[in-house]
Image (tube, rainbow, N blue to C red):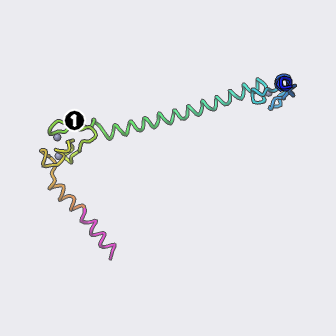
């Protein structure tokens, strides 16, 4: 009994007559479930069209990527003409990313980062005067708008 029902299930799976599918493009040929209900010719055309669209898309992305890479490189070259020093100018200790850039333009370790710890060339007195001169008109303008 159990064997008979198993045999029946196998029969319906293998020998059931399949209704012929016509190609969904109405080209007159028979379609195939394996090829999205299209005949082999229409399926090939569809696949080709899809891959062409994909290729065009990939080419576009590539173009954009290379354009932005060029742009980025150009900006980097303009902003950093020489590689930044990763050593303290005072003790030559390697500081890497933890280095401190002084206002004199040189890089120092945490010990020598302050102007009085290294022979700083930056004119703080002059900079202070300039800063006060720059800030004064702002303060005046602030007062004017408030009254
Ligand atoms: Zn077709
Ligand atoms: Zn140092
Ligand atoms: Zn300095």
104 w.r.t. 137: above or below: above
Res. 12 visible in picture: no
Left or right placement of residue 63 versus residue 7 in this view: left
Q: Quadrant of the C terminus?
A: bottom left
Left or right placement of residue 139 versus residue 118 in this view: right
Label 1: how many Cα within 10 Å (few below 14, some 14–19, many 20+): some
Image quadrant in which you'd find residue 138? bottom left
Q: Secondary structure at mark 1?
A: loop
Q: Give the percent coordinates (x, y) of residue 63.
A: 51, 33
Image quadrant in which you'd find residue 99? top left
Task: State the residue at coordinates (26%, 37%).
Answer: 96
Task: State the residue at coordinates (20%, 58%).
Answer: 130
The secondary structure making up most of the magenta span is helix
Is residue 145 magenta-colored? yes
Of residues 39 and 82, the one drawn nearer to the viewer in this rendering = 39
5 w.r.t. 80: above or below: above
Left or right placement of residue 20 versus residue 133 in this view: right
Is residue 122 magenta-colored? no
Q: Which residue is mark 1?
A: 94
- Which range is magenta? 135-147
Res. 53 visible in picture: yes
Question: Which quarter of the rendered image does ligand 1 occupy?
Answer: top right
């Amino acid at each position: 009994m159990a064997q008979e029902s198993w045999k029946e299930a196998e029969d319906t799976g293998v020998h059931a007559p399949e209704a012929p599918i016509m190609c969904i493009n109405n080209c007159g040929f028979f379609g195939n479930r394996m090829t999205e209900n299209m005949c082999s010719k229409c399926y090939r055309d569809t696949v080709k069209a899809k891959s062409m669209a994909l290729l065009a898309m990939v080419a576009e992305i590539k173009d954009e990527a290379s354009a932005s890479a060029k742009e980025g490189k150009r900006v980097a070259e303009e902003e950093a003409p020489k590689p930044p020093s990763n050593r303290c100018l005072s003790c030559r200790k390697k500081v890497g990313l933890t280095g401190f850039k002084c206002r004199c333009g040189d890089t120092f370790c945490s010990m020598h980062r302050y102007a009085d710890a290294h022979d700083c060339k930056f004119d703080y007195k002059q900079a202070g005067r300039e800063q006060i001169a720059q800030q004064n008109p702002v303060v005046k303008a602030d007062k004017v708008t408030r009254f």
